[in-house]
Amino acid sequence: MSSSGPARRARWRLRLHQIIFEADTPGGKVFDVVLLLTIVISLIAVMLESVEAIDRRYHSTLRSLDLVITALFTVEYVLRLICVVRPLRYATSFFGVVDLLAILPGYASLFFAGTQSLLVIRGLRLLRVFRVFKLSHYLGEARVLVTALRASKNKITVFLASVVIVTVNMGALMYLIEGDEAGFTSIPRGVYWAVVTMTTVGYGDIAPQSPLGQAISAVLMVSGYGIIAVPTGIVTVELANARQAITTRVCQDCAQEGHDSDATYCKFCGAKL
Amino acid sequence: MSSSGPARRARWRLRLHQIIFEADTPGGKVFDVVLLLTIVISLIAVMLESVEAIDRRYHSTLRSLDLVITALFTVEYVLRLICVVRPLRYATSFFGVVDLLAILPGYASLFFAGTQSLLVIRGLRLLRVFRVFKLSHYLGEARVLVTALRASKNKITVFLASVVIVTVNMGALMYLIEGDEAGFTSIPRGVYWAVVTMTTVGYGDIAPQSPLGQAISAVLMVSGYGIIAVPTGIVTVELANARQAITTRVCQDCAQEGHDSDATYCKFCGAKL
Amino acid sequence: MSSSGPARRARWRLRLHQIIFEADTPGGKVFDVVLLLTIVISLIAVMLESVEAIDRRYHSTLRSLDLVITALFTVEYVLRLICVVRPLRYATSFFGVVDLLAILPGYASLFFAGTQSLLVIRGLRLLRVFRVFKLSHYLGEARVLVTALRASKNKITVFLASVVIVTVNMGALMYLIEGDEAGFTSIPRGVYWAVVTMTTVGYGDIAPQSPLGQAISAVLMVSGYGIIAVPTGIVTVELANARQAITTRVCQDCAQEGHDSDATYCKFCGAKL
Amino acid sequence: MSSSGPARRARWRLRLHQIIFEADTPGGKVFDVVLLLTIVISLIAVMLESVEAIDRRYHSTLRSLDLVITALFTVEYVLRLICVVRPLRYATSFFGVVDLLAILPGYASLFFAGTQSLLVIRGLRLLRVFRVFKLSHYLGEARVLVTALRASKNKITVFLASVVIVTVNMGALMYLIEGDEAGFTSIPRGVYWAVVTMTTVGYGDIAPQSPLGQAISAVLMVSGYGIIAVPTGIVTVELANARQAITTRVCQDCAQEGHDSDATYCKFCGAKL
């Protein structure tokens, strides 16, 4: 950390950085929790504003709350810019952009009516919750999950490619078979229907009417119903491996591995691990 | 157990306690089964009462049945209060509150028409079925399940937090994209739609109409369809571990369990197994 | 096998028994396949008859086909009764009853119009397909599956009991919260809705309208979406165990187990298995 | 490779074959990626043409694009025929037929209006994406997946047969119970409903109305919801096995692979690993 200001100001910035950006000090912990609560309150306000009946009664209260939180978020954003060593890097990072976007609609709503709906972008700030999680024992869990998902990335890609190919072809086929009455007015709509069906969501807004169409979609349903077994199996196997990889040590005496994370003696030769 | 009454009364209370609260004596077993049957009959009566056509024909029969069962449950509640050592602790416990709530609407319905619907709270008494299960060989199974779920608690929390963040953001996004005609009248409704879609329930009461909305929801569907693999993988791996931990041997030296099936030495104290 | 008739008739019955009841002779194999095909043809006929447009055109053809197959099934049923050692035991067994029920509606339809719909009971005869499967290498697979499902029986019971308790309570709660307009006209309908929602089927014929009802059902959806992980985990772990138990042999030299089914030498000490 | 032409022409054909059919040369790689992009563009054009509003505005542009791509695909098809050693074998192979079908509707549309919809068959050409995947590290992943699915083939067959039997019988039963108003107008429609319900798709276009029908379908839903655990468990176990088999060592004596990670001797020939 190379602060160019005098030593005292540097210490002040360092302290601020610890509170705002780091999460393993008491101050940082409190800051993170307060920030999360503010984000949640802000989101509830935006949500309630979007409900017409509530907005009509509490419009001014909710608008004031919006403005107060916009002010708070602005202060926070400026403080982040000040205490960080490379402000530009933060400002162009994902979280920096989200933090900026979370305050802009607040000011825009002062001049243009209706733009407060854009405040919903604050929902992305909820991602900060993972920072709070990261603090404690969630770290290991998250690492296992991420390792597993990264290891299954290629297989998941193959799986997703298959899903895309099947839905595109089935959607086009159903467009040819079913008429406009059933809702298959274009190929993209057919593909949308195929996704809705294969993922077993099944809205029912588009549904096959002809016997042939129903027979084909029955096959698609059973496929979708069964194929979910593939990614599930992939993730499960990778999770088991990721977990094992993390919890495994090798005995220095007999060089055998496979010890549990809570083992203190080698289970094969009895030597101390 | 410190009973303040004379020895004979104490023995009587002890016997009653065994029957009502314990489940490993023949009397207790019979009591539990009879109680469960009464709860089921009571629930069926309340359910049938709520069906208008049936209620019109058999109103008085069903009302009488309600009152008889209310009387029985009252007797049971009083007996529980009598035979338990600390009545207040039982009365304020979860099951104590449920037991009380299960009889109150019965008396209320004598004075206020319509309150018998509240008798449905008796459904919570069905939870006592797990006490009957607990008796026999279900104990081990339940222990494996609970161990696995407790071990995956943190990962499940991360998973649920992700689901909440995704649904909130997708719901808000769709509120901005889709108009009122598609049913997205407010952000909370959008979030409700996102939950309905991501969990692959798909009622179809709210469904995207615009091509962009359909494209985005297709992504959400495939995500929801595939992401279920994550909790499934987590629970499977933890179940496998919980099962293995429980089915293995105990060290004769340090009395700790949790050894793998291929272990020849205790991993805690190094003694030969 | 203690046949009371003369030796020649006994041999004839034995041969017939082999063809009809056993599946590992060429004759038995041919019989099973022909029988399955006849069942499938019969089912297709009954299905087509139920489609009004087709029935109007081909009514007499389909009726004749029904009668021919009824005659064939009758002959088969009589032959089964003749060649089996204990006819009464067969006649009262599950398959015996199904075989009888599969021919009765055929005769009834001669006298009472409309009873041919009951011929659909022939669908149960499809279960014989598993006999054909049983013949070959499906035996091992089925054994693994059955072993796994039997081992997870208790845990599955606990799981199903939880599902029942949750749906009953949620159905009753939603009946109280939502009015008749949303479709919650009685508690049983509420429970039906809860099942439709928790299993992620989501017809949408009954759907919550009030914000509170939607919030509660969102919780139910996420529960149903996530809880499926539990039975999946259970079955997966038991399948892994069942498979291992079946494919495992012990080395006679070093007494270690864990060998694959295709191993010819012990992987630990190199001795011939 | 036995080319009958002069050596120079042979070398030219060989080079062309490398580019078009093989994927591990730089030229082949570029060809595959360009081909895939052309297929995707072609599909987007066909999809947009099927949307009435877009087709009305850009009809001639999209038609021209169709014709250009048809011409390109024709050139590609002819080149494939030329450079392959046995043109007939290619022309009658799956990909050969798809490649031909992908150009025919383009020419047909010149003479018959409306036949351009048949161009959607080009969607099948997307399958070539797996050739690109095959190139790199996706090979191992795909092999694990295919091995696992092949190993679980028999169990999956048993599972699918059960699903068919259950849906046929439930569909027929519901046809008898529910009337025409609920949408159960014929047994095939009932079977279609059973598939929609058991796979948890749940369109809601056909839904039970009577209490008995709803009770039975609740059972079907819970079955469908829980039974998915079976194929998931099967695939997971087989994936774990396939992965283990592939990630292990090869015996230096008998060159066979498939040894467990904890093996010290070859399980096939007994040699030390």
Image: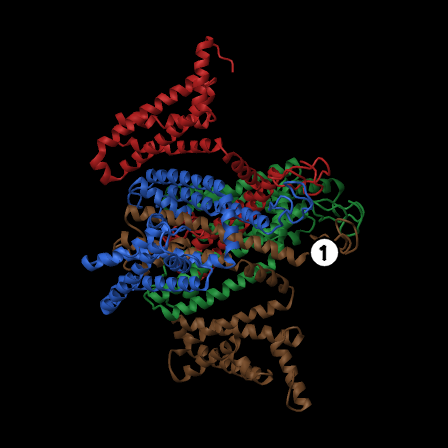
Chain colours: A brown, B green, C red, D blue
- Residue B150 relative to residue A184: left or right: right
Single out the residue that lies furthest toward the bottom. Answer: A6
Element under label 1? loop
Identity of the amino acid at label 1? Val
- Foreground residue, B111 or B229? B229
- Foreground residue, A229 or C56? A229
Question: Circle 1 marks a residue in which chain?
Answer: A
Single out the residue that lies furthest toward the front. Answer: D6
Q: Is residue A111 visible?
A: yes
Position in image of residue B44 (x %, y %): 46, 43
Single out the residue that lies furthest toward the top. Answer: C6
Name above or below for residue B226 compared with residue D208: below
- Residue B20 relative to residue D124: left or right: right
**Residue linked to disc 1:** A250
- Residue A202 relative to residue C143: left or right: left
Report the number of numbered marks: 1
Q: Residues within 10 Å of mark 1 (few under 14, many from 20)?
A: few
Position in image of residue D84 (x %, y %): 37, 53
Q: Is residue C227 visible?
A: no
Position in image of residue D55 (x %, y %): 24, 66
Position in image of residue D124 (x %, y %): 35, 55
Examine the image and state in which quarter residue D65 appears: bottom left
- Foreground residue, B8 or C161? C161
- Foreground residue, B151 or B216? B216
Name above or below for residue D244 compared with residue A160: above
